[in-house]
């Protein structure tokens, strides 16, 4: 298990983590910031051009998961991880990959109001013997207060909140330990096993009466997606699409779906790629749209969007697949793609 202590600089994550080691038997401190420092030493300087935060490196996010899994083969756990994580898509990617490895996460937000954070930041600057380094740290800390405030709405909805404004580090750790023992902060997201080879996946495009397409926002990976999922062994792809739509959205579709595209997705480590099929699920009436349901452990939101809006929301590979699927729907003829490009 991982106890992920989230929060901005000055909230008390690190001091609480140190105290928490005494309260959770077998626990080990796991600091992913060390992985970021290592990447800065190992990667060419050019790789960091335009990147101010190592969290923006896909390699760092993969290493966070892989290192956690490796550590848990050496120590009993839990891993105590004091790490600021403000971008929801990075939370989805990391926590989803941990869930796929059957590593449970307790997400705890160590929070303090902005006035208290500013006081703590000023106190640390005064206590420092290196004035130049202290001023740099103060500027960095203050600059992160805005992004933290912007992230608070989703953080409060996702994590168990411990307000540290009037707590000592020990008291904070005691509250976190009690919450963890009670199961608070559990990220009950879908636990789809990581693939070990190429996969076959079936997606379904659903439309409203304005011909906008339905996209869903998964909790377990970054980026918007089409309803659908991996085809199970011995399952017909169209049937898999129908099953996934029923499981994800509570909508029963007819079994005969029209194929729009077959797309071969190239392997891109750590992914294995495979065949991706998109089917036309038809137009939903307002009544059926009103009955859409979301499984909280798998999807957090849905939205009907235009083709232009979809381009800004989807990763490039999914956007290309959608673009050609819409052309195939207009022409009434399925298309064969390789890596999002028509062939044949």
Image: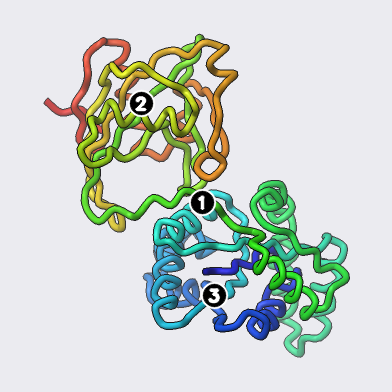
Q: Is residue 164 above or below residue 265?
A: below
Q: Of the residues tagged 3 and 1, which is closer to the observer? A: 3
Q: Are marks 3 and 1 in contact (CB under 8 Å)?
A: no
Q: Are marks 2 and 3 in contact (CB under 8 Å)?
A: no
What residue sits right under mark 2 in the picture? 242
Identify the residue shown where x is 47% and y is 47%: 222
Q: Secondary structure at mark 3?
A: loop
Residue 232 in picture, x, y percent from top left: 27, 40
In the rendered image, the residue lying farthest to the left is 344
Answer few, some or many: residues within 10 Å of disc 2's Cα (few below 14, many 20 plus, some between 14 and 19). many
What residue sits right under mark 1 in the picture? 92
Q: Nearer the viewer, residue 40 or 208?
A: 208
Residue 186 in picture, x, y percent from top left: 60, 58
Identify the residue shown where x is 60% and y is 60%: 85
Left or right relative to 233: residue 71: right
Tell me which label, 3 or 1, sits earlier in the chain: 3
Answer few, some or many: residues within 10 Å of disc 1's Cα (few below 14, many 20 plus, some between 14 and 19). some
Answer few, some or many: residues within 10 Å of disc 3's Cα (few below 14, many 20 plus, some between 14 and 19). many
What residue sits right under mark 3 in the picture? 78
The C terminus, quarter of image: top left
Q: Secondary structure at mark 1?
A: helix
Left or right relative to 32: residue 237: left
Tell me which label, 1 or 2, sits earlier in the chain: 1
Identify the residue shown where x is 84% and y is 73%: 167
Whole-number angstrom distance, CA of label 2 to CA of label 3? 39 Å
In the rendered image, the residue lying farthest to the front is 182
């Amino acid at each position: 298990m991982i106890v992920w202590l989230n929060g901005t600089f000055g909230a008390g994550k690190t001091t609480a983590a140190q105290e928490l080691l005494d309260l959770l038997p077998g626990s080990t401190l796991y600091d992913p910031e060390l992985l970021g420092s290592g990447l800065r030493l190992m990667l060419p300087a050019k790789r960091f051009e335009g990147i101010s935060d190592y969290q923006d490196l896909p390699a760092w996010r993969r290493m966070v998961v892989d290192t956690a899994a490796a550590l848990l083969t050496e120590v009993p756990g839990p891993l105590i991880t004091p790490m600021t994580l403000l971008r929801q898509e990075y939370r989805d990617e990391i926590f989803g990959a941990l869930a796929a490895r059957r590593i449970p996460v307790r997400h705890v937000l160590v929070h303090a109001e902005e006035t208290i954070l500013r006081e703590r930041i000023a106190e640390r600057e005064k206590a420092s013997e290196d004035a130049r380094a202290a001023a740099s740290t103060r500027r960095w800390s203050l600059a992160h207060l805005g992004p933290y405030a912007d992230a608070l709405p989703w953080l409060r909805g996702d994590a168990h909140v411990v307000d540290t404004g009037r707590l000592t580090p020990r008291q904070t750790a005691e509250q976190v330990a009690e919450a963890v023992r009670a199961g608070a902060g559990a990220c009950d997201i879908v636990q789809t096993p990581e693939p070990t080879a190429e996969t076959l996946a079936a997606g379904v495009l659903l439309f409203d009466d304005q011909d906008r397409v339905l996209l869903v926002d998964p909790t377990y990976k970054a980026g918007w997606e089409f309803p659908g999922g991996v085809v199970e062994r011995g399952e017909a792809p169209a049937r898999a699409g129908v099953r996934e739509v029923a499981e994800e959205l509570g909508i029963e579709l007819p079994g005969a779906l029209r194929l729009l595209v077959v797309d071969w997705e190239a392997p891109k480590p750590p992914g294995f790629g495979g065949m991706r099929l998109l089917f036309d699920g038809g137009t939903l009436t307002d009544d059926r749209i009103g009955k859409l349901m979301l499984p909280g452990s798998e999807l957090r939101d849905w939205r009907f969007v235009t083709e232009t809006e979809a381009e800004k929301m989807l990763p490039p590979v999914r956007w290309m697949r959608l673009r050609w699927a819409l052309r195939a729907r207009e022409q009434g003829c399925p298309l064969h793609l390789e890596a999002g490009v028509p062939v044949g």
